[in-house]
Image (cartoon, rainbow, N blue to C red):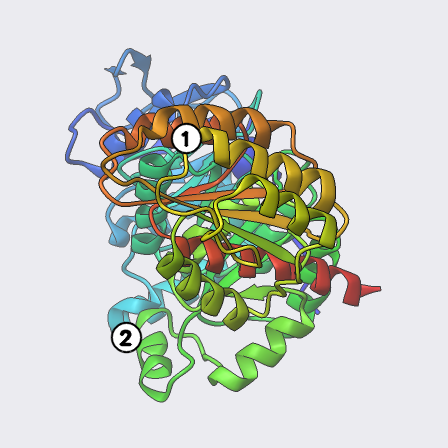
């Protein structure tokens, strides 16, 4: 098994030197320095540029040799043909941790392969640990110790979710969607060529952090399958791991070789392997984002017995099909709950699972039906999923106010979807989210999310 390395200096360094720092917005060195400042990093930042002087208000060193003591981490953002010289200087000045963002290594043909081999040789001889190369860096906004060394264009909103990715572009998409949908992502790791630190190292480190409640992975290949399994199972015993693993088709495996030089697994093997690792596999970035939304609020996952609570028949039908396709159970209503619903609902309402409150349902129907579900069904169901269609003749705001109050105090996980023309969607969704309820634009996505969350308790129980 591969010997683990210390990841702390790459997530919580006490001081950082940025080799290649500059002021230009369009330069990598300028982007990294600005992001470091924007992240509210509290440690010492030393821009390193041959011109010296002052950069963005910080005194600059002309080289690593000019520092009075080695930085905890040196971030390298210069031309690839100059990087080996910086490694030599780092070795001579006692710098032990280098984050190398530029490409130009094994992904760049024969010259790059030779450069990477020499980088590895020099680093190993000097006892230096390399993050990267050919990566977008790290964002780690853990409470009390924020740090970001990256040229990614934005920072995520913060929260308990960590993302580890072998694709910088997918990382950027996750950050964008996290900000758009307020997904609680705080840590983002772009792995790159991983000559020393690889996916398993970051998973091991983040899995041990109390600030991290869920880990999302985009992976194409795994360097040490046995070590990944051991680490993943240990982490999954405490928090969910969700993986999008590419390269499962013959053409996809070829694309993996071209992208990272890694060796991918066929789909059937991926399924079996990740299940053995107690990792939830998702087939798309969209599903990974759904996992982030669900586990962001319910990191323990949910049980498999769900109640579908609706005011429209058609969406209830397609959502029922999706729930069953996800492997979820839809038990019959407890008799006491069914009797209560028959008393309070119009005769044409559907009293079953799913429940149909009818399109004209207002808060005086939604509220009592939900309260009765808790009173009579708390032991029969593991989660309540709600479909809320908004027809022209019903004001949805009082319904949302009622449901937000009730769900916030509910002993069961709740999910809420809204359909139709939603003129106040942002306000309504914010109200439900403030009550701790994940919200969805369509009920099928809600069902998919519930399905993903229901996998975690089963996988954790199988760890033993």
Q: Earlier in the sequence, mark 1 or mark 2?
A: 2
Q: Along the horizontal axis of the image, is 16 left or right of 315?
A: right
**Residue ranking furthest to the right:** 464
Percent position (x, y) of residue 264? 45, 79
Percent position (x, y) of residue 15? 51, 25
Identify the secondary structure beneath mark 1: loop
Please name whichever residue, 399 or 199, is drawn nearer the observer in this view of the structure: 399
**Residue ranking furthest to the bottom:** 250
Discs 1, 2 touching: Cβ within 8 Å: no
Q: Which mark is residue 110?
A: 2
* Residue 388 higher or lower than 197, as above or below: above
Q: Residue at x 46, y 69 (%)?
A: 321
Q: Which mark is residue 313?
A: none
Q: Quadrant of the N terminus?
A: bottom right
Instruction: Residue under label 1, please give it.
Output: 157
Percent position (x, y) of residue 349? 47, 51
């Amino acid at each position: 098994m591969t010997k683990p390395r210390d990841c702390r200096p790459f997530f919580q360094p006490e001081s950082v030197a940025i080799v290649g720092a500059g002021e230009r917005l369009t330069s990598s060195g300028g982007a990294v320095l600005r992001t470091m400042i924007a992240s509210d990093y509290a440690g010492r930042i030393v821009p390193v540029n041959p011109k010296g002087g002052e950069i963005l208000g910080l005194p600059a060193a002309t080289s690593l040799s000019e520092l009075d003591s080695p930085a905890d981490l040196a971030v390298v953002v210069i031309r690839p043909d100059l990087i080996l010289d910086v490694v030599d200087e780092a070795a001579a000045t006692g710098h032990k941790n280098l984050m190398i963002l530029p490409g130009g290594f094994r992904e760049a043909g024969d010259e790059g392969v030779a450069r990477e081999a020499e980088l590895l040789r020099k680093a190993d001889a000097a006892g230096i640990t390399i993050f990267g190369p050919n990566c977008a860096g790290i964002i780690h906004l853990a409470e009390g110790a924020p740090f970001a060394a990256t040229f990614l264009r934005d920072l995520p909103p913060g929260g308990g979710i960590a993302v580890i990715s072998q694709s910088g572009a997918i990382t950027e998409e996750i950050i964008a969607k996290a900000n758009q949908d307020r997904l609680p992502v705080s840590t983002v790791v772009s792995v790159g060529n991983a000559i020393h630190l690889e996916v398993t190292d970051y998973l091991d480190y983040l899995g041990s952090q109390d600030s991290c409640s869920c880990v999302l992975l985009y992976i194409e290949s795994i360097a040490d399958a046995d070590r990944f399994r051991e680490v993943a199972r240990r982490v999954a015993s405490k928090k969910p791991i969700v993986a999008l693993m590419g390269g499962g088709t013959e053409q996809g495996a070829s694309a993996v070789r071209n992208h990272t030089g890694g060796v991918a697994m066929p789909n059937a093997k991926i399924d079996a392997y990740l299940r053995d690792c107690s990792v939830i596999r998702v087939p798309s970035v969209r599903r990974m984002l759904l996992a982030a939304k669900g586990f962001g609020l319910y990191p323990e996952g949910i049980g498999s017995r769900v109640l579908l609570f609706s005011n429209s028949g058609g969406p209830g039908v397609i959502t029922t099909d999706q729930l069953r396709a996800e492997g979820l159970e839809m038990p019959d209503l407890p008799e006491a709950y069914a009797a209560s619903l028959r008393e309070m609902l119009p005769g044409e309402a559907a009293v079953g699972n799913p429940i149909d409150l009818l399109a004209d349902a207002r808060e005086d129907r939604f509220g009592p039906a939900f309260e009765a579900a808790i009173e009579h069904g708390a032991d029969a169901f593991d989660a309540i999923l709600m479909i809320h269609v908004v027809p022209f003749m019903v004001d949805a705001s009082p319904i949302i106010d009622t449901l937000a109050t009730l769900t916030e105090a509910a002993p069961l996980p709740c999910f809420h979807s809204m359909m139709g023309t939603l003129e106040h969607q942002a306000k309504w969704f914010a109200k439900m989210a403030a009550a701790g309820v994940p919200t969805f634009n369509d009920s099928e996505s809600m069902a998919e999310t519930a399905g993903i969350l229901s996998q975690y308790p089963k996988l954790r129980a199988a760890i033993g």
